[in-house]
Image: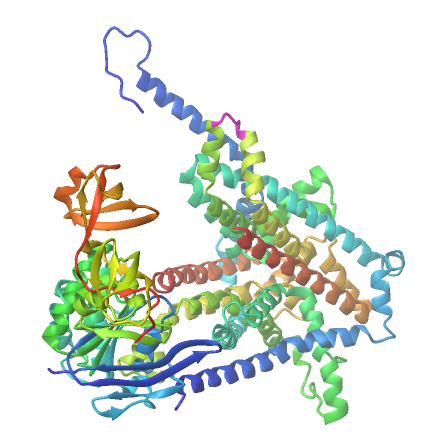
Amino acid sequence: MAGLIARRARRQRAFRWIVLVLLGAFFLLPLIAMVEFASRGGGQSWRLLVDWPQLRETYPDLASGIVASLGQAVLTALLMLVLLVPTAVWVRLRLPGLRRLIEFICLLPLTIPAIVLVVGLAPVYAWVNYFLGGSSLTLTFAYTILVLPYAYRSIDTGLSAIDVKTLAEAARSLGAGWGRVMWRVVLPNIRSAVLSAAFLTVALVLGEFTIASLLHRDNLQVAIELLGKSSATMSVAVSLAALVLAFILLLLLSLFGERRKASR
Amino acid sequence: MANVVDTPDLVAPRPEIRARRGVGITRARSLLATVPFFAYVVIFLVIPTLVVVVDSFTGNEGGFTLENISALGDGFIVDAFVRSIVLSASTAVVGAILGALLAYALVTAKPNGVLRRAVTAASGVLAQFGGVTLAFAFLATIGLSGFVTVFLKDHLGIDLYANGVWLFELPGLMLVYTYFQIPLMVIVFLPALDGIRPQWREATESLGGSTWQYWTRVAGPLLAPAFLGSTLLLFANAFSAYATAAALVSQGNPIVPLQIRGALTSEVVLGRQHLGHAMALGMVVVVAIVMGLYALLQRRTAKWLA
Amino acid sequence: MTGVAVHLNDLRRSFGALHALDGLDLSLVPGELIALLGPSGCGKTTALRVLAGLEDADSGRVLVDGKDITGLPANRRDMGMVFQAYSLFPHLTALQNVEFGLKLRGRKATTTRANEMLELVGIGAFAARYANQLSGGQQQRVALARALAIQPKVLLLDEPLSALDAKVRVQLRDEIRRIQTEVGTTTLFVTHDQEEALAVADRVGVMRAGRLEQLAPPAEVYLQPATAFVADFVGLSNRLPGRIEDGGVTVFGTRLPLVTPTTRGPEVTALVRPESVDVVPDPDGTGRVLTTSFLGPTSRVTVEVGETLVLAQIASGRVGELAAGTPVRLELRPVPVALDGDAAS
């Protein structure tokens, strides 16, 4: 038997492995190099990473950058949720005509690069400074705009999947007020969409550099860049740690997504 | 809305009018709930955008002027745009081709197998992996004292930077950008590849077509819009990128985002305060055009390969 | 145009422990339409795909027009194929789809021929439409035109109507039969719908677990099922207790002839078709009417006889006298029956 189909399958498999090995090497190389580089000098960098008090003493700027980024991530996630979820649900239920507009607005940040946005943000932030001071946490306002496209898409998909309209109508016909509908009917059902939006937000905020740097504020990435000028090995170690953290976050996100699909 | 018969005896306003006004009030109240969102977006998105647009046309003394726009024609700015376009186009094309090959390799594997899920997840992470961390990763790899640089010099006698340190110039940026362009291509192009039905290949074969004829007459034309659209998306992505270049390039401002950095940190020639705004406007125009074309191509793809 | 003879000899194909084809022998007479019928997983689609060259058999031979084409790649087999779904190329119009095979072979005047084929299948008016502008039935007509345009030696239809609405299915299967008879191409038609198979085929091949249980004209498959599986799969069957006597089987007092003689006995289960069962109101009868189902020209009556439920199919005019609870007796027509547990011949 000629086994032509089997031969084609074999050729495809060979192609697959060649491509994966070559590209895999390209992608793994910098990661391996980072590990090697950061381990120079006796692995001191790794020890510092897990020793917070020592880290704060040796690299105070880095420590404050980490703290600032964490605060920004949490605040941005909260602000995004507070702003986006009620609006998205409300528009679906009562103002379907506005949906296109909201969608367009939420996709706009994709077309307006961060570097452009920061140019226009400077005067706005002058006012923010006036009212709220120059803390790094005020970057939350800008970051919430940056995450809009990803967060909105996630929440919108979640709302599509559960037919919000029917749920809300059912709840209302049973006598629930709007607040209760939101809190007890809609929210629990889009939990995974909301969580995934939050994860994406955190990943994005932890990786943000452009706006923080050009508005002269504190931030993990800004701190890493600064660190690069003084201690190369430490900066690479922290970069790798940040990357691993982002990887874990996105991995958890994809696992969540699978669990949701499995339960439906 | 029920229709009520008009009787002249009614003193109160007719129910239909009342109902219509009622709907109007409810409508207004509904809109009220969206005010926080819109107010926020206006302050932090619309106003900055307007600032960029308006200030591009504002002279140093505050009046309307076109000199910022015309200044975009200056040698060094045109060079920066050209270099940005070259960087974005080259990494988009290379990323598109290699990414498409990788995506094709994935689509021939088992659909829910470990390989495909692992590589897709890794692509998701690496596509986001940009900015400072990526720059430092490459410094650790092929920087002046990087892993590979040292290895080549010690074991093979090759000096990567014999002709200058290209890592901190356009060639270096091209190499580093490819690192996140390829995974982005995989993510964006894979759904289109999934939309290619096996029946089309089998139909081509049973009608007498060879593999070449299948790719040139069926799969090629079907995937072309998706491939082109994805390439455009990669272009926009590279064009907008700032952090990676900012971390790698400390001397000089070869590309437009770095020129804007220069304008904001007042390295620019005195007397051209709003040049940065004009450059930002230029960037937005380019990205908007590219994204518009992308959207058009996406619609075609969805029609054929949904 | 006359068709060619097709022979599938002792085809075997296994996927691990699963035998998709277990020694399949099938011959098609030139110009005939054979319907391969069977439940999911019986191997009918595998058989078709091996014939098409889209799958390899582990062993066995495929002969078309006297030539052994077992080792020939699919694109050199000169066969036309219609798929269950996603038949058409979405980026081409109906006309361009039909022209596709002709253009591949470098023929001239492709447009004229393509238009002719579209007229033949009844949708000449939609030549300029794309797949997503055509209904399911229309798409399959175009697919048929495309397959026939290249004047293939064999026409292969892989459950072409399964994805369509019931009404369109009936309409289209008659069309397919008409066109196939007109063009004269030897055709293999795979389906899991037994009514469809019986309606279109010259001969019906009932398959199970990779082998043919029976290959015969539709009437023979229905009225003289070779095995219990065929009797059960094609049409409805009652399972009624019977006793072997005098070369036949006695069921409810009536002696019925057997399709195949048997050495089993004396207690067996006979497979009796509902239309062979008549229901007569009888105050002394042993049966009682349970329910009736109005199906249009005929009706189905479920009768309880002791512990057994019997399904009978009668003319609808008589349903009036068979209200639920009416005592009745069953009269079985002396049509040959198969026995449950008969192995494949």
Does the magenta-highlighted stretch encompass residue A175? yes
Query: Who is closer to the viewer here, A215 or B116?
Result: B116
Residue at coordinates 42% horizontally, 77% vertically from top-left? Answer: C19
Q: Is residue B168 positioned above or below B305 on the image?
A: below
Snapshot quadrant of residue C60: bottom left
- The N terminus of chain B appears in which quarter of the rendering? top left
Snapshot quadrant of residue C79: bottom left
- The C terminus of chain B appears in which quarter of the rendering? bottom left
Does the magenta-highlighted stretch encompass residue C161? no
The magenta span reads A174-178
Residue at coordinates 13% horizontally, 63% vertically from top-left? Answer: C125
The x and y percentages for residue A208 are 66, 57
Name the outermost residue toward the front: C246
Residue at coordinates 26% horizontally, 36% vertically from top-left? Answer: C325
Query: Does the magenta stretch mainly form a helix, a strand or a loop?
Result: loop
Q: Is residue C161 visible?
A: no
Query: Who is closer to the viewer here, B134 or B162?
Result: B134
The x and y percentages for residue A40 are 83, 76
Is residue C285 toward the left or the right of residue A246 in the image?
left
Is residue A126 toward the left or the right of residue B15 in the image?
right
The x and y percentages for residue C245 are 25, 64
Q: How many numbered marks, from 0 up? A: 0
Q: Is residue A98 visible?
A: yes
Query: Who is closer to the viewer here, B284 or C328?
Result: C328
Snapshot quadrant of residue C191: bottom left
The x and y percentages for residue B243 are 65, 63
